[in-house]
Image: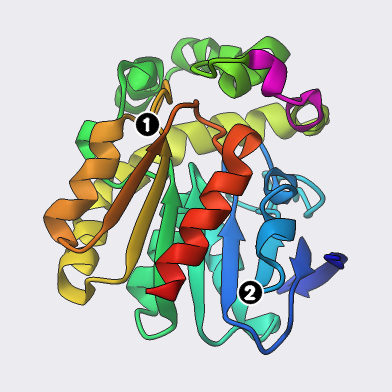
Amino acid sequence: MCAVTYRKVDVDGVGVFYREAGPKEAPTLLLLHGFPTAGHMFRDLIPQLADRFRLVAPDLPGFGQSDMPARSAFNYTFENIANVIDRFVEVTGLHRFAIYVFDYGAPVGFRLAVRHPDRLTAIISQNGNAYEEGLSEGWNPVRTYWQEPSPTNREVLRSFLAPETTRWQYTHGVPDVTAISPDGYSLDNFYLARAGADEIQLDLLGDYKSNVALYPTFQNYFRTHKPRFLAVWGKNDPFFLPRGAEAFKRDIPGAMIDFFETGHFALETHAKEIAAKIRDFFAL
């Protein structure tokens, strides 16, 4: 049986909600979610690993059950989100840990790795990109906004926040869409519908260019420190291409790369298989 606990901790004035499972003394995995979801995306993975690992899955600021400060009080950039998670790690007493990063969680986790290479034991990336060739043409409307952050170009990005888009992100590239539970995307859409959430998410889409600008820094970290690395990638992801997963091997020749016949939210269909890969990875 897997006992999951749910807590909220004050991180310098921002309440960060997190779920946790597994023995306190076990090797720790910090699970960092992406857009537009929250820590509940790990609900199927956690029970698969809790006998072997301590798993800690925070909701990023502005997501899930974590605080969503007003934009006037909190500047929604990936750097600031990484600052909060950096402090969250300290407040919760995580001294040495591996990171499991997905989507938005990747640039957050990679920032932590660059800042504190001594704290990281390994990196697991589920469609968490760090290379230009990993970005598909699906990013073109966002790139247009980066180049010209006009109100018109910002308005175009609202389609990324539509309920049908969230559902599409879950089902695109999945051979059998009946395998996709509506729980995940329904909860994501609930959080996206909160007052003010739309502008926060548009801010973050605009700031994603800061992550691309840091790709050379992340790659230098990979080359210099060569962390133990596992990619578990939904190969039909419409946003982060398989080439982005393969690119990690340029800087980390020993990286292990595994592809699954599914889409962006690979855990929705392959949690058991991904958990097995993680167990094998840490058994080496």
Which residue is depicted at the point 49% across and 26% down?
262
Q: Are marks 1 and 2 in contact (CB under 8 Å)?
A: no
Q: Is residue 209 magenta?
A: no
Q: Residues within 10 Å of mark 2 (few under 14, many from 20)?
A: some
Write down the region rendered in magenta: 177-185
Q: Secondary structure at mark 2?
A: loop
Which residue is depicted at the point 37% across and 38% down?
259
Image quarter in which the C terminus is found: bottom left
Residue 178: x percent and y percent? Answer: 71, 15
Q: Residues within 10 Å of mark 1 (few under 14, many from 20)?
A: many
- Which of 279/238 is in front? 279
Q: Secondary structure at mark 1?
A: loop
Q: Nearer the viewer, mark 1 or mark 2?
A: 2
Residue 150: x percent and y percent? Answer: 43, 18
Task: Identify the mark at residue 240; answer none if there is no mark.
Answer: 1
Residue 15 in view here: no
With 138 as the anchor, is 131 left or right in this view? left
- Which of 48/202 is in front? 48
Q: Main secondary structure of the magenta part?
A: helix
Q: Quadrant of residue 137?
A: top left
User: What's the CA distance linking mark 1 and mark 2?
Assistant: 28 Å
Residue matched to label 2: 53
Q: Is residue 268 above or below residue 19?
A: above
